[in-house]
Image: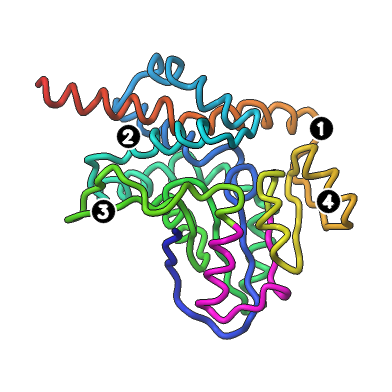
Amino acid sequence: MARIEAASTPGRAAAFFDVDNTMMQGASIYWFARGLAARKYFTTGDLARFAWRQARFRLFATERAGDMSQAKEAALAFINGWRVDDVERLAEEIFDELMAPRIWAGTRRLAQEHLDAGERVWLVSAAPVEIGRVIATRLGLTGAIGTVAEVVDGTYTGRLVGDLMHGPAKAEAVARLAAVEGLDLSHCAAYSDSVNDLPMLSVVGHPVAVNPDPALLRQARRDGWDVRDFRTGRRAVRIAVPSTAAAGLLAGAVTAGLALQRRRHRAG
């Protein structure tokens, strides 16, 4: 289930942007983890120790039931017991410090072109919706669709509302939003770097591959989709591998680090 955060504007067209490696260099949850590590919520040793399992999930794009179950359990552990306002405050601080310099200028221009045309622009990410909402607000976009966690009395319960915003879930969320907002998907655009987002790209009339992985590039060329690549030469290679692996830190480093920090607080 996706949470929708927006102010309605006229028109039946909109644009939907993936975040990681599409709007931003690297993974938003990785930069969030880096910011938390700088604030001593966990150590670099925690980062290394717990990264591998979810790095494998991301690197091989596996969606077997066991893999998705592990990813979901990790997301639950990450949010359990935290207050929403604390997560949002930290996300704002960390965006300004670490994420803002890594926004792709070319992708940002594409989003602005849609805004200038009077269209709404939404981020669609597997990251917690609170992080997506902060990024959208900072960039002046319409809103964000992301993974939604259950909240009771301002505190995360450790349960997700629906599934992780990944793969087909993104397309379903976009379709639901279009129905609510009165959008004509045939007039809408979607942007992503990953073949995992083919369902979202296929549901709109104007799919665009941005900084595409090899599988998405092949698909885009086969179907005649627009391709925009804001990477150059060796820099693109350097960015691709660490940023993909770093996305796995949601289940590993962030989860374990925050749990460790909670234990330290209780012990103190």
Residue sitting farthest toward the left: 268
What amino acid type is highlighted by mark number 3?
Val
What secondary structure is marked by label 4? Answer: helix
For the residues marked 4 and 2, what is the alpha-carbon distance in whole angstroms?
37 Å
N-terminal of the two: label 1 or label 4? Answer: 4
Query: Which residue is label 3 attached to?
Result: 151
Q: Which mark is residue 77?
A: 2
N-terminal of the two: label 3 or label 4? Answer: 3
Region in magenta: 171-191
Query: Which residue is label 4 attached to?
Result: 220
Q: Is the residue under label 2 in contact with that under label 3 (CB below 8 Å)?
A: no
Residue sitting farthest toward the bottom: 10
Position of residue 91 measured from the top left corner of the image (x, y, whole percent): 37, 46
**Residue depicted at 11% across the width and 20% down the height:** 267
Q: Residues within 10 Å of mark 2 (few under 14, many from 20)?
A: many
Position of residue 235 measured from the top left corner of the image (x, y, whole percent): 74, 31
For the residues marked 3 and 1, what is the alpha-carbon distance in whole angstroms?
44 Å
Q: Main secondary structure of the magenta part?
A: helix
Query: Which residue is label 1 attached to?
Result: 233
Q: Residues within 10 Å of mark 1 (few under 14, many from 20)?
A: few
**Residue depicted at 74% across the width and 28% down the height:** 237
What amino acid type is highlighted by mark number 4?
Ala
What amino acid type is highlighted by mark number 2?
Ala
Position of residue 119 measured from the top left corner of the image (x, y, whole percent): 62, 76
The mark lying in front, picked from 3 and 1, is: 3
